Image (cartoon, grey):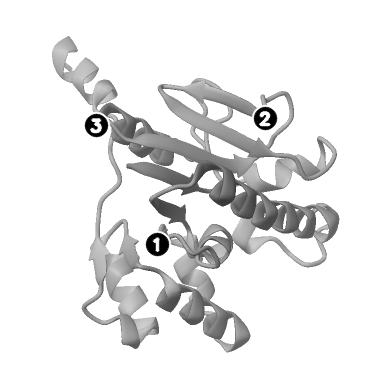
Amino acid sequence: MRILMVTHNYPRFAGDHAGSFVARLASGLVSRGHVVRVVAPHAPDVPTSEVVDGVEIRRFRFGTDGMERVAYRGDLHQRSAFDPSAIVGIPAMLLAYAAAVRRESRQFLPNVIHAHWWFPGGAFAVRSRTPTVITCHGSDVRLLDRGGPLLAFGRATLRRAAAVTCVSEFLTRDVTRIVPELQGQVRTIYMPLDLTPFERVRSSGM
C-alpha cells in the first residue's frame, strides 16, 4: 500500500522529539512492506527531500529561516494573532501546506492519506479524492472546544474523512461528545512507543 502521511510536526534530525511518534509509525509501516511518503514543513538547515528509515520525506518551503520555525515550536494551535512571527509565518505555511498536499497527492498517487491532527493537515487532506484517515492528537481536539466557525469547520473536516482515530480513550470520548454525529465511528489507536529506554533500564537492574 502507498501511504501519504501528512503532518506539521516531524523529526528534523536524529534524536529530534518533534513528531517522533509519527516517525515511529511511518517507519513501522515501511517495515511491514508499505511505501510511505511524509509531507511536513521545512525547517532551517534541514533537507527538503530525504529518506530516513525507509520513509520518503518531503519538506515544503514557505519562507525565510525565521518564518520556517513556526511549525516546530510546539504551540502552533495556540499562537496569538498578535505574535509577529505568527502573523506572516502561519498563513504562509498554511498556503504552502495545502499546495504540498495537492502536489504529493497527484505525484505519489497514494492508496490512502493519513493526516495527523485534523487541523491543519486533515483539513487539506480531505479535499483530495484519496480516502483519508485523520488522527487527532489532543491540541486539535481542544480547537473544537472553541465553538463557532472553528467547530463548524472541524465537524465538516472530520465528517469528510474515511476514518477518524484518536490516540487515547479520553480524546475519543471528547471528539464524540463535541461531534456527536461521529458517535460509534471514532476508533482509539495508540501511537507506537519506543521501548528501547525502558529495556536499557531493565537490563541495568535499576
* CB within 8 Å, label 2 to label 1: no
- The amino acid at mark 1 is Pro
Instruction: Check the image and report above or below for 74 versus 78.
Output: above
Q: Quadrant of the C terminus?
A: top left
Q: Position of residue 52 (x, y in %)?
A: 47, 22
What is the distance, in whole Å, between disc 1 and disc 3 at their CAs?
A: 20 Å
Residue occupied by mark 1: 131
Q: Position of residue 19 (x, y in %)?
A: 48, 40
- The amino acid at mark 3 is Arg
State which mark lies toward you, 1 or 3. Answer: 1
Q: Which mark is residue 21?
A: none
Q: Give the crowd class for mark 2: few <14, some 14-19, many >=20 residues within 10 Å.
A: some
Q: Which mark is residue 48?
A: 2
User: What residue do we see at 28% from left, 66% from top?
Assistant: 170
SS under mark 1? loop
User: Depth check: 85 or 165 in front?
Assistant: 165
Mark 1 or mark 3: name the one nearer the start of the chain: 3
Residue occupied by mark 3: 32
Q: Can residue 108 be seen?
A: yes
Q: Give the crowd class for mark 1: few <14, some 14-19, many >=20 residues within 10 Å.
A: some
